[in-house]
């Protein structure tokens, strides 16, 4: 959880504000998602709506503070971020995608000396990835709520937390983390570092779908900077901390000015994505039991550089076109109903049910008021 590692690593990561999420608010998030996506509208109550509006106002107040007013923030829960959620203004998705396509084409023309074809699947996926990152920026309470309430990841995590709480023996500590937005951070310069028993074992590009020409320009220099930062700034700070002795996964980013920052820390578990590595195929390497990589050069469309290996994609994944179109179509469909409109509909349904429940049952009344044979 962010609140667990942030105090030890705050000097090398982004300024972060923590906002508690109450059990009542968590239940409201679960109820909204269930009503919207799982046909459980009858379980959504007016108190759920009140809790969601309360959370929205609390978040909005933080985002209007001096700490976030100029740049906005990236929002996440204690465990995961709502990267699978939809922005409040879904028009941003298609617009941001088109803009990213133009910008990346121009960047490639400068780097490679020739313009790239905008129809290339790899270019489209790179544009989608950059556009997605841009709409993760939140500036208002509505921005945050739209992402949270449309995210399956948030639903699963909040539901699990509520179930554990109600089962007993669980200390509630769910929080929203609002992390100051870094406008110059690009997803192609994010990397996932696997640390086991205090030693950096391997590094992968974070966005494992795409080929990034800029990463192949000087991979050895890239490798050396990432490895040095992870060892000197991350591993050194966590050395001797019991809960991290066994292992962890650090996500790092290189910024245009040459500095390196920690994005987040993840558990060393199979539930954490291995990016270009594979938890089964590369188990010996990632666990530190073998110094040999498990793939030949060029196998799986990847190449390893240096030691510990930095793995980069050199061949694009197949069927990227289909993935891009599917993602854009889903965003368009989601955008037809903003979360606020859905919330209003659910409120109306809850009021109607409460109104019907408060009315006397006409059949029951007639039963009790009908004259008995003796009265007649």
Image (cartoon, rainbow, N blue to C red):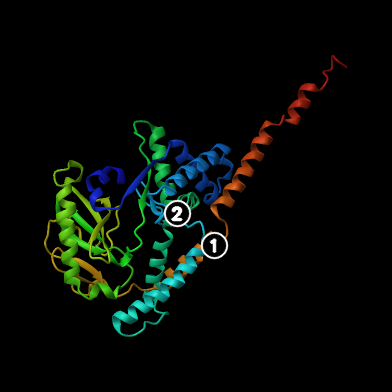
Q: Can the viewer see residue 318?
A: yes
At a point 49% along the width and 64% down the height, the residue shown is 92
Q: Is residue 196 left or right of residue 264?
A: left
At a point 18% along the width and 57% down the height, the residue shown is 230
At a point 16% along the width and 46% down the height, the residue shown is 245
From the image, state whether disc 1 or disc 2 is nearer to you.
2
Residue 86: x and y, percent? 47, 57
Q: Is residue 235 left or right of residue 76?
A: left
Disc number for residue 333: 1
Q: Earlier in the sequence, mark 1 or mark 2?
A: 2
136 above or below 57?
below
Residue 374 occupies which quadrant of the picture? top right
Quadrant into which the N terminus falls:
top left
Residue 184: x and y, percent? 33, 64
Q: Please identify the residue farthest to the right as the structure is shown.
A: 376
Judged from the image, the secondary structure of the residue bearing numbered disc 2 is loop
Residue 322: x and y, percent? 44, 71
Quadrant into which the C terminus falls:
top right
Disc number for residue 102: none
Q: Is residue 190 left or right of residue 30?
A: left
Q: Which residue is mark 2?
A: 139
Q: Can the viewer see residue 197?
A: no
Q: Foreground: 340 or 328? A: 340
Q: Please identify the residue farthest to the front as the structure is shown.
A: 66
Q: CA distance from mark 1 to mark 2?
A: 23 Å
Figure label count: 2
């Amino acid at each position: 959880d962010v609140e667990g590692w942030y105090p030890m690593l705050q000097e090398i990561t982004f300024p972060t504000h923590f906002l508690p999420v109450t059990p009542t608010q968590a239940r409201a998030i679960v109820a909204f998602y269930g009503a919207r996506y799982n046909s459980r509208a009858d379980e959504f109550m007016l108190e759920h709506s009140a809790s969601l509006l309360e959370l929205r106002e609390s978040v909005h107040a933080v985002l209007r503070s001096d700490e976030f007013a100029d740049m906005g923030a990236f929002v996440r829960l204690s465990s995961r971020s709502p990267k699978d959620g939809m922005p409040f203004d879904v028009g941003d998705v298609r617009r941001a995608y088109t803009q990213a396509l133009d910008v990346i084409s121009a960047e490639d023309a400068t780097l490679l000396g020739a313009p790239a074809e905008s129809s290339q699947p790899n270019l489209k996926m790179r544009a989608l990835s950059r556009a997605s990152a841009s709409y993760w920026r939140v500036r208002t309470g509505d921005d945050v709520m739209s992402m949270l309430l449309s995210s399956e990841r948030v639903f699963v995590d909040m539901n699990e937390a509520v179930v554990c709480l109600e089962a007993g023996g669980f200390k509630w500590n769910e929080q929203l983390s609002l992390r100051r937005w870094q406008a110059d951070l690009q997803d192609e310069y994010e990397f996932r570092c696997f640390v086991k028993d205090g030693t950096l074992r391997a590094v992968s590009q974070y966005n494992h779908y795409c080929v990034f020409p800029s990463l192949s320009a000087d991979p050895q220099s890239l490798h050396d900077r990432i490895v040095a930062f992870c060892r000197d700034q991350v591993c050194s700070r966590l050395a001797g901390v019991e809960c991290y002795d066994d292992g962890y996964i650090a996500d790092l980013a290189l910024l245009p000015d040459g500095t390196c920052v920690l994005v987040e820390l993840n558990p060393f578990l199979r539930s954490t994505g291995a990016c270009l590595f594979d938890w089964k195929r590369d188990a010996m390497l990632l666990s530190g039991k073998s110094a040999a990589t498990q793939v030949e050069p060029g196998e799986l469309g990847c190449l390893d550089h240096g030691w510990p290996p930095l793995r980069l994609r050199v061949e694009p994944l197949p069927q990227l076109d289909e993935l891009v179109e599917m993602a854009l179509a889903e965003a368009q469909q989601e955008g037809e109903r903003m979360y606020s409109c859905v919330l209003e509909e659910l409120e109306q349904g809850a009021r109607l049910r409460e109104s019907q429940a408060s009315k006397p049952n006409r059949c029951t009344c007639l039963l009790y008021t009908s004259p008995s044979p003796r009265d007649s």
